[in-house]
Image: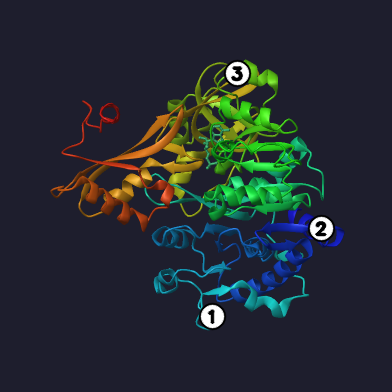
Amino acid sequence: MLREKIDAWAIECADRIAHKHRQRALTYKGLKEESDALAIWIYETYMIEGIKRQTPVIVYGHKENEMLVSFVASIKSGNPYVPVDSSVPVERFKQIIQASGARLILSPKTVPDEIKELTDLNLIIKDNISLFDVLDFYSRYIGQVPPTEWQVGLDEVYYIIYTSGSTGVPKGVQITLRALESYLNWVNTAYQPVEKSEVYLNQAPFSFDLSVMDLYMSLSTGGTLWSVDKEQIANPRELFESFKESEVSIWVSTPSFAEVCLMDKSFNQELLPNLKRFLFCGEVLTHDCASKLVQRFPKGLVENLYGPTEATVAVTTVTITPEIHDKYNPLPVGAAKPDCKVLICNSEALTEYTKSGDLTKKPEILPEEERGEIIIAGPNVSIGYLNNPEQTAKAFFTWEENGEKLQAYRTGDAGMWKEGQLFFFGRLDFQVKLHGYRIELGDIEENLRQIDWIDNAVVLPIERKGKVDYLHAFLTANKDITSEFEEAQAVREALRSSLPDYMIPRRISFLERMPMTPNGKVDRRALLGGQK
Ligand code: AMP
């Protein structure tokens, strides 16, 4: 199992670096010793006071070694972890603590005072602290090993990742160890990483499921995870300096991140001589981006993976060979993971089926070249959203085939199969991807309506070259708008306490009233028509 694999590197290659972030490195020996000790501390601290096994533990930070130690320690103590990036606004952090029912926050960082002071969050208070600097507390257990019976079992939840939810509250996707193992067996077979030799780029914060790809491919194969943080990403010169010494051989990022790097001419094989594979997931990989990468990195294979957090990172993949590149535009997202069904169904029929729960009303699978909604069924599909039966019932269902019952998820993505390849045609709902971030427009709208002088809010994605370029919010207010500029700034300021920066609309317009369609819905097309 995964834990045994990770621990085994501490013997086989004790001094190999498991994680590097700036000047700080964590060896496999260090990872094992520290996670063992911390697991015992968690068990002795957490599993008292009537707290049940499998109660989530929040790990708060941004790319620190201690985050990895905390992830592994949490699962060694039998509890799933919830990664929360330190860029999260306080209100959203609070929502995650409340929604997850977590009672403990592990953090190498200073947790905001607003969180520490919140007594209604039900966090454990031990010696007057509910939050701690990881290192100080568990050092007395170094050298001890937690019993294997404690660790998260195959069908227990291993991690929970929160994604944007259309109702304004994030949804916690629960991933079991079985789902994670199933995903890892697939990618490690498909890409054949060389054990104890690869260096993986980690671009995504650990709170996004894309990071699960690099983090666990690396830990399961004795690789080195090379993290770049948000300050480095914002400063290209520093980023490129760090690339030079990184020895990255497997690149994992959103296509958007690669596109930004491609703007610099020095982004080529000379900068990253060991680079042999690009693994992309999370948003459209454009033809143009793939061509540039193939030209600049003669030794690098470009892989396009597709999948949602709810199905453990990805479920289809394709290598963009010259044939695939020349034949298809848009590019396909590939063939399915062998033990997983990726099917196309009619959306209305699916809604009816999931509502009724009647297995005999199963919708038919659409034939090749017919477009419909992509559904995913198999061992890597999440068991549902934590403490959220309503949203779970809408998105998850049972798919029965040949007497076998599989957990299934409707993605809300439009797609079709053609010539053995899956093609992605955008969303069927109001979820968008902006620079790789998954955003429910309804989430922003709900937060806008929370501002007391805002009556109604509609947020639209504005596209450029086939991708979302920025978000435009249209608002009606219950007060006079004297200066659009100043009021827009006030709206942004108000949103900052509840939404991450990437969800704050770049353009904000105030309207007298929302345009309506004949059936009484906001006329989004009319809004788009009015936008320059
Ligand atoms: P997330 O849960 O953040 O990984 O977002 C999942 C969504 O990202 C999917 O439902 C798709 O809409 C989109 N997505 C993931 N991979 C791809 C891809 N290779 N091409 C286009 N869209 C993708």
Q: Tell whether 451 sits left or right of 43.
A: left
Q: Is residue 238 above or below residue 527?
A: below
Mark 2 or mark 1: name the one nearer the start of the chain. Answer: 2
Q: Nearer the viewer, mark 1 or mark 3?
A: 3
Q: Residue at x 79, y 52 (%)?
A: 222
Residue 131 place in picture, x, y as percent: 53, 73
Residue underneath mark 1: 126
The residue positioned farthest toward the left in the image shown: 480
Mark 1 or mark 3: name the one nearer the start of the chain. Answer: 1
The image quadrant of residue 120 is bottom left
**Res 40 seen here:** yes
The image quadrant of residue 326 is top right
The residue positioned farthest toward the bottom in the image shown: 127
Q: Is residue 384 above or below residue 33?
A: above
Query: As shown in the figure, which amino acid type bears the numbered disc 1?
Result: Lys
Q: Nearer the viewer, mark 2 or mark 1?
A: 2
Residue underneath mark 3: 328
Q: Are marks 2 and 1 in contact (CB under 8 Å)?
A: no
Q: Residues within 10 Å of mark 3 (few under 14, many from 20)?
A: few
Q: Tell whether 361 sits left or right of 343.
A: left
Q: Tell whether 389 sits left or right of 23.
A: left
Q: Residue at x 16, y 47 (%)?
A: 481
Disc number placed over residue 9 in the picture, else none: 2
**Res 217 seen here:** no
